[in-house]
Image: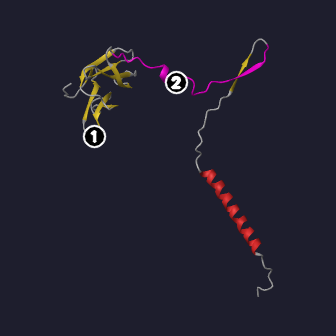
């Protein structure tokens, strides 16, 4: 029944198989390239800035500064934490903690005697609270309401060690800042 069909030579079958593998391989390669994230580092493009020379009115192209080369506003605008002489800045936290819609700053600095100094600066950088007897450096400072059932002021929670309950608050009581817990500071 199949005797009258033309026979294919083994060479044609081999080239057909190689062509089939090449097509499958190239399709697989393009799919791989399309769906694999690129590992190349992207460098910022430097666009030319047009500067007109007033003497001959011809534009001069100069490269614009790289965005990475310009100074960061955070570096140039370092706040003055009023760290006392002989002490070293450790950490700080800012928040509106007395409800005046202005930001206050809690600063922690290390003293030479091994204790830590905590103080609160108001929005004019005046010290409105301080305690120089903190025995340890906080590992984290967060803000939350000290007692949300009694008032709405945010308080600073200084965490001395995670998951231990070793923490204390610096709290605004409506008239002044205080450490409201009975801590031997």
Quarter of the rendering occupied by the N terminus: bottom right
Left or right of 82, for residue 45: right
Residue at image point 29% right, 18% down: 129
Seen in the picture, residue 60 relative to 29 is either above or below; the reply is above
Residue 145 quadrant: top left
- In magenta segment, residue 18: no
**Residue projecting furthest to the bottom:** 1
Quarter of the rendering occupied by the C terminus: top left
How packed mark 1 is, by other alpha carbons closer than 10 Å (few <14, some 14-19, many 20 or more), is: few
Instruction: Tell me the colour scheme of the image.
Output: secondary structure
Residue at image point 70% right, 61% down: 22
- What is the span of residues highlighted in magenta in the rendered image? 56-83
Left or right of 81, for residue 18: right
Residue at image point 52% right, 24% down: 72
The residue carrying mark 2 is 72
How far, Cα to Cα, is label 2 from label 1? 36 Å
- Name the N-terminal-most of marks 2 and 1: 2
The kind of secondary structure element at disc 2 is loop
Residue 141 quadrant: top left
Give residue 56's position: percent from left, percent from top: 79, 14
- Residue 81 numbered mark, or none: none
Give residue 135's position: percent from left, percent from top: 24, 26
Q: Is the magenta stretch mostly helix, strand or loop?
A: loop
The residue carrying mark 1 is 163
Give residue 32's position: percent from left, percent from top: 62, 54
**Residue projecting furthest to the front:** 11
The kind of secondary structure element at disc 1 is loop
């Amino acid at each position: 029944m199949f005797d009258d069909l033309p026979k294919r030579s083994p060479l044609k079958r081999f080239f057909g198989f190689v062509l089939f593998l090449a097509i499958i391989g190239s399709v697989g390669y393009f799919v791989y390239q399309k769906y694999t994230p690129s590992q190349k580092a992207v460098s910022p493009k430097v666009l030319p800035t047009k500067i007109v020379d007033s003497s001959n009115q011809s534009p001069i192209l100069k490269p614009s500064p790289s965005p990475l080369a310009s100074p960061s506003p955070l570096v140039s605008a370092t706040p003055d934490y009023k760290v006392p002489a002989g002490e070293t800045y450790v950490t700080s936290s800012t928040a509106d903690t007395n409800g005046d819609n202005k930001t206050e700053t809690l600063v922690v600095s290390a003293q030479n005697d091994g204790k830590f100094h905590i103080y609160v600066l108001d929005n004019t950088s005046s010290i409105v609270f301080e305690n120089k007897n903190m025995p340890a450096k906080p590992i984290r400072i967060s803000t939350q309401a000290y007692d949300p059932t009694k008032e709405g002021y945010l308080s600073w929670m200084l965490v001395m060690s995670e998951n231990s309950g070793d923490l204390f608050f610096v709290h605004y009581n409506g008239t002044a800042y205080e450490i409201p817990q009975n801590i031997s500071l």
